[in-house]
Image (spheres, rainbow, N blue to C red):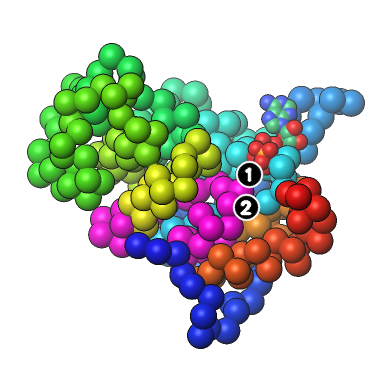
Amino acid sequence: MAPRSTSQRTAPELHAPHPLPDPVMAVRRLTKIYGSGDMAVRALDEINVDIERGRFTAIMGPSGSGKSTFMHCLAGFESITSGSVRLDDVEIAGMSQRALTKLRRNRVGFIFQSFNLIPTLSAAENIRLPQDIAHAKVDEDRFAAVVDALNLRDRLSHRPAELSGGQQQRVACARALMQNPTVLFADEPTGNLDSRSTEQVLSYLRRAVDDFGQTVVMVTHEAQAAAYADTVLFLTDGRVVAQLDDPSQGDVLDALAALDPHAGEERA
Ligand SMILES: Nc1ncnc2c1ncn2[C@@H]1O[C@H](COP(=O)(O)OP(=O)(O)OP(=O)(O)O)[C@@H](O)[C@H]1O
């Protein structure tokens, strides 16, 4: 599945994020400050945004703008300094570490740039690991559907070292999808992949949204990757400054240039 092309469409407009009727996540005045006193860093500054259910949201912004911090606060990996983050009916702000661990286990999936697979386990064992750790029964129908959707059936007995980077990331996707998470977060999931594997992993994430109704939130630096998403949120200095819906790669590049005229110089 290819990202949207620029041909024969008028460019969508950048707009401020607006509240949604039934968001899977509602973020209000989210502030995250690292450290204190002279050393304090305001990484997130009163963010207000809703994440749409069953859709693919990309988060973009310059280095240090707060993308990873934002995603880690949404996923319950980071404590929140102030404000509110609701995942469906659950308030994450102020949760105990124990409650956050439970939330991460039961409601949230995460895919990292570094795959995070167990090297001594086969692909199948890695995919089943969260259920095995929880002594939960693996839903074999879902396992079959996820393995087929990610085209991993003939790789199930292989260990991570025997798989390509793209295949390893697909195993990580499968493991996350097996948890049937309310939201699947992906932090630069294609950062370590070549262009062909990048396209495959992004296509599979897109399919997780289209075929499984999965909500996906992904941090990326790549306009090409963001073009697979339904919505792109742009962060600058810890704030969500703009939103772009149904973007092509060209739209994303135009938006990045409009929001940061020096972005091209940094990339060059
Ligand atoms: N643990 C920490 N302690 C102190 N400051 C931190 C910590 N983590 C992040 N920061 C600071 O918070 C700000 C946002 O960082 P963050 O990693 O979220 O940005 P980012 O947009 O994901 O950056 P990049 O694209 O470079 O990965 C930066 O100024 C960063 O230096």
Q: Viewer-proximal residue, 157 or 48?
A: 157
Q: How many marks?
A: 2
Q: Which residue is mark 1?
A: 67
Q: Considering the image in quadrants, where does the N terminus appear?
A: bottom left
- Ligand 1 within 8 angstroms of badge 1 C-beta: yes
Can you give x and y, in whole percent of width and height, for residue 50 in the image? 54, 59
Query: Marks 2 and 1: CB-CB under 8 Å?
Result: yes
Relative to 14, 137 lies left or right: left
Q: Which quarter of the figure has residue 168?
A: top left
Instruction: Indicate yes or no whether the magenta region holds residue 211.
Output: yes
**Image quadrant in which you'd find residue 155:** top left
Residue at the disc numbered 2: 60
Q: Which mark is residue 185?
A: none
* Local SS, label 2: strand
Q: Work out whether residue 39 or residue 206 is closer to the camera in this orientation and state it.
A: 206
Quick check: 243 above or below 225? below
Does residue 38 appear to the left or right of 1 in the view shown? right
Q: Which residues are magenta?
A: 207-232
Residue 183 appears in view: no
User: What residue sits 81% from the left and 61% below the top?
Assistant: 261
- At x 64%, y 76%, the residue is 13
Identify which residue is drawn at 53% across, 58% down: 224
Q: CA distance from mark 2 to mark 1?
A: 7 Å
Toward the left, the furthest residue is 140
User: Disc 2 residue type?
Assistant: Met
Q: Is mark 2 within 8 Å of ligand 1?
A: no
Q: Earlier in the sequence, mark 2 or mark 1?
A: 2
Instruction: Pinpoint residue 52: horizontal percent, then vertical percent.
Output: 46, 61
